[in-house]
Image (cartoon, helix red, strand yellow):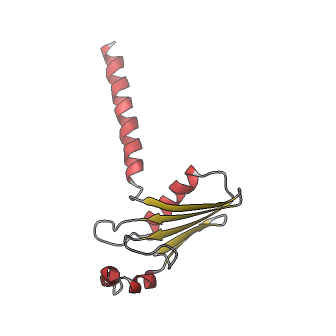
Amino acid sequence: MMLKKSVLFILIVLFFSSALASAGEIIEHKILKKEELGKVKLTIDVQVPLVNGRLPNEKELGDLSMYLVKKEKKHERFFISFYLPGMKVGSGAYATAHHNPTMKVNIMKFMLYEYPQYKKFLSK
């Protein structure tokens, strides 16, 4: 009986640790705005922070985009704009992810020229 409880406890710990690890792969984010066009299209503006002092990369933004799309399954197409803190929504995003229907992430570093706090990332 004790062995069964120990095995059950280990399985529960493994399950929750793997769930937490997979949740940890998604970078922090804040939904700024959502606009729907019926079931055809969903547009989401998202703020993402720097990741360990650097700009979020294509994989991190793609993983976040897939995470957001999975939560909103009822649309045919998704358009996600990623903004860094301090960027003005609607004036050009740092990156976009379009699911039309397959995902394509596009990072646009040139949009950072407007923001002095991000110019140090432009020479890299």
Which of these two is toward me, 63 or 39?
A: 39
Which residue is pictured at 53% across the width and 58% down the height?
A: 66
- What percent of the width, then of the height, locates residue 5? 34, 19
- Furthest residue toward top: 1
Which of these two is toward me, 92 or 124?
A: 92
- What percent of the width, then of the height, locates residue 102? 63, 64
Which residue is pictured at 42% across the width and 59% down the height?
A: 29
Using the image, determine if residue 115 lies above or below residue 26.
below
Which residue is pictured at 42% across the width and 56% down the height?
A: 26
> Quadrant of the rendered structure where residue 51 is?
bottom left
> Quadrant of the rendered structure where residue 49 is?
bottom left
Which of these two is toward me, 103 or 108?
A: 108
Using the image, determine if residue 27 lies above or below residue 81.
above
- What percent of the width, then of the height, locates residue 32? 48, 62
The N terminus lies in which quarter of the figure?
top left
Q: How many marks?
A: 0
